[in-house]
Amino acid sequence: VSYGTAGFRGNASGMEYVFFRMGMLAALRSKLKEAAIGVMVTASHNPEHDNGVKLIDPQGEMLAQSWESLATALANVTNDQLIEQLKQIIDSQKIPLSNTSFMLIHVYINNSYKPSSLSLSRAVLDGASAFGATCHDHGLLTTPQLHYILACYNGGDIKVDEEHYYQNYASAFKALLNKKLMNQPVTSPVTVDCANGVGAAKLTKLAERIGANIIDIVVYNDGQSGKLNENCGADYVKVQQRAPAGLNMEPFHRYASFDGDADRLIYYTLDSDCNFILLDGDKIAALFATYIRDNLKKASINLRLGIIQTAYANGNSTNFLINQQNIEIACTPTGVKYLHEKALTFDIGVYFEANGHGTVTFDPNKSAEERFAAKKLKLFLDIINQTVGDAMCDLLAVEAILQDKNWSVKEWYRIYTELPNRQAKVQVADRRIIETGDAERKVILPSMLQPAIDELVRKYPSGRSFVRPSGTEDVVRVYAEANTQENADDLAQQVSLAVY
Ligand code: NG1
Ligand code: ZN
């Protein structure tokens, strides 16, 4: 097993030892950092039989990359070698064992129906208590809620809890909408598919704190009958390019999907001919970035704004941002940690994976004067969870911008037209033989693969395609885009065959 872009993830059965060892590692990291460490038990958008574990660093950021290999090493030794491996970590990292350690964890994840979560969470707690860690169990939370609570806790607010999160974002949203800075309140509802995950109950609470007179949120797939991430959720809608099963849609009404742990958000609707229209992470990023840029301009504030994308960003979103909007763009490998890190190099960084995971970061060192000059912008940024992509906060941010611009979803999706695209996956004997470069846009090894892809791509107008080994599944992912859906599908299939 290896600690990939999303921690350890896989079929939940037989994974207790990994969770136990991650409890130990979290306790050690806490001693080293002299701060609380977060532990998430989740498999995000994966099917219900999977589970996973992820460590969160003190400010709510992803575990430092240098510790990922320690996690992998610790998870892969035999029981006999465990103590020796722990000693090595303690020595090499110079961990002061006498320091106290704290951990914030939430026990169930995704929803209370996920049977594996309880025993796996216990395994984490057992591992942590082997090093005497004090554990604060926050119960059922979304991933971004735990990131938020951890950052507040380490910032000195040790009483912070879930309610604090709702109060914070509900009042930020209300402040933005009440200041008479905005246009008329939106009265039409937004329907949110919560993937039968933890987001359903949490979004209901947030909506209650805001008030139905301000935002009308209808929760769909609340976990009462359907299965977690099955025929629903952000990943399903994005990859299948269709609505969650059973959802009755009206043209130009607003629909959104979270994933199982509520850190991804995508929107969709129907046009007047009832064609399905997707507004994915790229469209959300474009909406956020142009809104921020316009507000900076209005207030004559000169801050460096950048958008961070991955190779999965639609080619037309990149064209729109660079050529029509003149906004700086950077591209990183897949995985939030890379995007987040890059975003921090800008005064204001907007990052989104096409799958809907993203947020906005702003440099706290920029003078308060600059940040407060544009009052509306300051209030807008207060709605953002800067620690990590947060489906609930991103939903509020989209709703606020649409309201302010007096836009329906129609004006939003028309800012640019996506190139038709297709994602596919190929099962191979060993996906790790594929090595990529140039932010995963080119294959380096095996050396004959990239020329083969190039030759296929040349046959299709506006063609682009790349392949990379998944960090969370035992597959090679293939992405293709072209001028028509038929060509995109065809290119994806040809490239899949080349990989195979
Ligand atoms: P992999 O399996 O490495 O493609 C997927 C997503 C990532 C990220 C991680 C973590 C795609 C194409 N890939 O990674 O963006 O979200 O899961 O959850 O969506
Ligand atoms: Zn997720």
Image: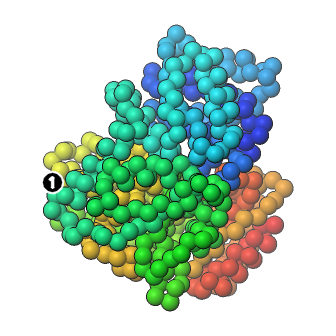
**Going 44% across and 52% down the picture, which residue do you hit?**
203
Give whichever of 64, 372 is nearer the camera: 372
Q: Label 1: few (<14), some or many (≥20) within 10 Å?
A: some
In the figure, is residue 277 to the left or right of 71?
A: left
Height in image: 199 above or below 107?
Answer: below
Task: Find the residue positioned furthest to the front.
Answer: 224
Q: Position of residue 99 (x, y in %)?
A: 49, 13
**Which structural element holds mark 1?**
helix
Residue 397 seen from this side: no
For the residue marked with disc 1, what is the amino acid?
A: Ala
| Quadrant of the rendering where the N terminus is positioned | top right
Q: Position of residue 289 (x, y in %)?
A: 34, 64
**Going 77% across and 40% down the picture, which residue do you hit?**
13
Height in image: 429 above or below 278?
Answer: above
Q: Position of residue 327 (x, y in %)?
A: 35, 67
In the figure, is residue 240 to the left or right of 202?
A: right
When asked about the image quadrant of residue 15, the answer is top right
**Going 21% across and 50% down the picture, which residue do you hit?**
371
When asked about the image quadrant of residue 207, the answer is bottom left
Residue 474 seen from this side: yes
Give whichever of 277, 166 is nearer the camera: 166
What scheme was used to colour the molecule? Answer: rainbow
When asked about the image quadrant of residue 477, the answer is bottom right
| Quadrant of the rendering where the C terminus is positioned | bottom right
In the figure, is residue 375 to the left or right of 236?
A: left
Height in image: 155 above or below 496?
Answer: above
Height in image: 432 above or below 162?
Answer: below
Q: Position of residue 270 (x, y in %)?
A: 49, 80
Q: Is mark 1 within 8 Å of ligand 1?
A: no
Task: Find the residue positioned furthest to the right.
Answer: 429
The residue pinned by badge 1 equals 373
